[in-house]
């Protein structure tokens, strides 16, 4: 694959990201796929989907897990409902995450990814140990599939994420770096964090956002790429610096406004194309 191949976060049913048809209309060569619903995750559907992607000339670079009941309404709701950390849903979601990794395998994809959820900052919190254990469990399942597991960044500072990865002790655990999330969640300056965790970064989101008045307590605002506080040129320069050559996957979650979503992703593709040309 070409260096910094452009891509978009997409889904084939009503999941996050843009519909596959929109990805095609925008002319992107790669997507990260938000896992489709359980009943559709069959080899037959995988084969059909792969045939369609081959027609469209699109390659899947990662399959993202997501679960029913997750809500990103505000920071406390996100902490309570997202990922494998919340105890009430952990067992069922862990099973489902392994099934999603198996579906990624059916699609020939070597990367499964997810929002793990809010890992407690206090290592003595029993939830911390539980988060380490469940991540090991999913990593080991992925390893059996010859896959890596990528953790979406955002909730943790770069330092905390490094500590966590060190504690999990699995060599197929990496990072899907999302610079906007660091700003939206108020977990630290993204460029500094990227330098810190760079050696683990194997996939990235190109997303932008602005800081909240009270970072960490309330959401920052997600905005069109280039209009937020990330600094896209600095972001790409830093990706260059850490030796990242993988895809640049645009994420824009405004499903309620598909016209604007498509237009802004188009704008993001243009911006990234210009920056790629400038930096190469
Ligand atoms: Mg993201």
Image (cartoon, grey):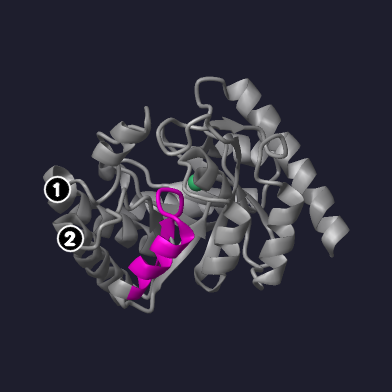
Q: Secondary structure at mark 2?
A: helix
- The image quadrant of residue 79 is top left
Q: Position of residue 231 (x, y in %)?
A: 71, 46
Residue 59 showing in the rendered view: no
Quadrant into which the N terminus falls: bottom right
Q: Are marks 2 and 1 in contact (CB under 8 Å)?
A: yes
Image-quadrant location for residue 199: bottom right
Residue at disc 1, secondary structure? helix
Residue 216 versus residue 16: which sits nearer the camera?
Answer: 216
Residue 48 seen by the camera: yes
- Above or below, 20 relative to 135: above
Nearer-the-camera pick, 153 or 264: 153
What residue would you read off at disc 1? 87
What range is drawn magenta here? 149-166
Cα separation, mark 2 vs mark 1, equals 9 Å
Q: Is the CB of the residue bearing disc 2 within 8 angstroms of ligand 1?
A: no
**Tag 1 or tag 2, which sits nearer the N-term?**
1
Q: Write down the residue under mark 2.
A: 130
Residue at (48, 42) in percent of width and height: 186
């Amino acid at each position: 694959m070409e260096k910094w191949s452009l891509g978009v976060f997409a889904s084939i049913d009503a999941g996050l990201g843009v519909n596959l048809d929109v990805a095609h209309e925008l002319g992107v060569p790669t997507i990260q796929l938000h896992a489709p619903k359980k009943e559709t995750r069959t080899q037959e559907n995988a084969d059909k989907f792969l045939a369609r992607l081959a027609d469209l000339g699109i390659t899947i670079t990662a399959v993202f897990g997501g679960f029913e009941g997750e809500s990103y309404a505000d920071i406390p709701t996100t902490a309570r409902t997202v990922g494998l950390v919340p105890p009430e849903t952990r067992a069922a979601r862990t099973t489902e995450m392994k099934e999603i990794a198996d579906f990624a395998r059916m699609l020939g994809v070597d990367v499964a990814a997810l929002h793990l959820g809010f890992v407690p900052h206090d290592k003595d919190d029993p939830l911390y140990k539980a988060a380490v254990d469940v991540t090991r469990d999913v990593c080991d399942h992925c390893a059996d599939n010859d896959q890596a597991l990528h953790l979406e960044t955002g909730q943790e500072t770069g330092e905390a994420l490094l500590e966590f990865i060190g504690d999990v002790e699995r060599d197929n655990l990496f990072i899907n770096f999302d610079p906007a999330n660091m700003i939206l969640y108020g977990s630290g300056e993204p460029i500094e964090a990227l330098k810190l965790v760079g050696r683990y970064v194997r996939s990235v989101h190109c997303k932008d956002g602005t800081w909240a008045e009270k970072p960490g307590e309330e959401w920052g605002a997600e905005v069109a790429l280039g209009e937020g506080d990330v600094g896209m040129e600095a972001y790409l320069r830093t990706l260059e610096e850490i030796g990242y050559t993988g895809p640049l996957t645009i994420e824009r979650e405004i499903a309620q406004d598909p016209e604007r979503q498509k237009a802004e992703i188009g704008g993001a593709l243009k911006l990234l194309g210009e920056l790629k040309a400038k930096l190469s």
